[in-house]
Amino acid sequence: MSWIDIGALDDIPPRGARLVRTGKGCVAVFRTGADEVFALDDACPHKGGPLSEGIVHGTSVTCPLHNRIFDFATGAAQGADSEVTRTYPAKIEAGRVLLDLSRLSGRSAA
């Protein structure tokens, strides 16, 4: 894996998100109330809603447009088996959030 430092954990509010823009698309980075971090494609696969603007609860986020709930670990939508958003490895080291965006390489630009 090729880890990229995207900033301090404290830059993301608890139960909040930040958007990381790349040449291959946008990634939403979420912080849970338990200070875990997760990363998903920012666009909801249902209607393209910005997941980074959704409501974080537990280890899920609710799309702000259509209330679809996505699991951070799997990217799957509750009750909609065909709706899955891409996940990216994320971790915290020494108070910094690191992402592995190598999966972006196989994707076309947004």
Image: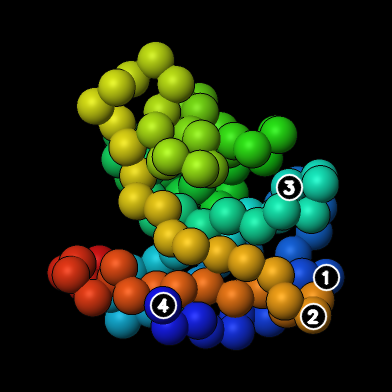
* Badge 2 amino acid: Ala
Q: Nearer the viewer, mark 1 or mark 4?
A: 4
Q: Which residue is mark 3?
A: 32
Q: Nearer the viewer, mark 2 or mark 3?
A: 2
- Marks 1 and 2, how far apart at CA: 11 Å
The answer to whether one can see residue 17 in this image is no
* Badge 1 amino acid: Asp
- Marks 4 and 3, how far apart at CA: 23 Å
Compared with residue 64, is residue 8 higher up or lower down, i.e. above or below?
Answer: below
Q: Nearer the viewer, mark 4 or mark 3?
A: 4
- Marks 1 and 4, how far apart at CA: 24 Å
Q: Secondary structure at mark 2?
A: loop
In the picture, measured across the screen, residue 91 lies left or right of residue 64, that is: right
Mark carried by residue 74 = none
Q: Which residue is mark 2?
A: 94
Q: Position of residue 32 (x, y in %)?
A: 73, 47
Q: Residue furthest top?
A: 79
The residue lying toward the viewer, choosing from 57 and 38, is 38
Indicate which disc, 4 or 2, sits on the residue closer to the N terminus. Answer: 4
Q: Which residue is mark 4?
A: 1
* Badge 4 amino acid: Met
Q: Quadrant of residue 101?
A: bottom left
Q: Which residue is mark 1?
A: 10
Q: Quadrant of residue 77?
A: top left
